[in-house]
Image (cartoon, grey):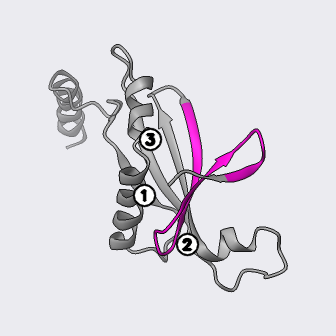
Amino acid sequence: MKKSSMICAALLVPALLLSGCSFFIFDDSDEMVTADKTISQDTLTKITSHLLDKVPNIRAEKLKLAAGDTKVKLTLSILSSPEPDFTKNDPDYRYHAFYYWVYVNYTTKDKLLKYNTYLVQKDLAEILLYNTETDDFVKVA
């Protein structure tokens, strides 16, 4: 029984590799995920779609980074949802109480090329981008 299983496995692996079903094929399709388990699929779709619609530079940056034959994956990840109970005397209170934090990154199969942090207001009225030079958020939409 062990021998037949080993033979099947030995034949299956080359067959998968030849057919292109490798476990190491890089998927460059866009991905929308959430690290905050309280966010529903509907909310994830609503927030990420709104961000992509209002900030066309996100997809434009992917095209720029994917020059030539480079495959680039765009990932939007909602890190946290608005927390109305966030400490009110904290200087960043409004950012945590009223915004979704969205991490946007561009990767190849080997490395992280670029990333940004966006804040999307819970009523979708405003989108902010973190500016690393000024260490502050600036309005983009």
Residue 10 at x, y = what percent? 23, 28
**Side of 26 where 131 appears, left or right:** right
Q: What kind of residue is marked 1? A: Val
- Which residue matches tag 3? 58
**Side of 82 where 23 appears, left or right:** left
Picture residue at 35% right of the left edge, 13% below the top: 68
Q: CA distance from mark 1 to mark 2?
A: 13 Å
User: In terms of sequence position, does the residue under pointer 1 or pointer 3 come before the other?
Assistant: 1
Q: In the picture shown, does residue 4 fall above or below 34?
A: above
User: In terms of sequence position, does the residue under pointer 1 or pointer 2 come before the other?
Assistant: 1
Residues at circles 1 and 3 in contact by the CB criterion of under 8 Å? no
Mark nearer the viewer, 1 or 3: 3
**Side of 28 where 4 appears, left or right:** left
Picture residue at 44% right of the left edge, 48% below the top: 55
Q: Quadrant of residue 1?
A: top left
Picture residue at 23% right of the left edge, 34% below the top: 9
- The mark found on residue 33 in the picture is 1
What range is drawn magenta here?
113-137
- Which residue matches tag 2? 81
Front residue of this view, candidates 115 and 29 = 115
Mark nearer the viewer, 3 or 2: 3
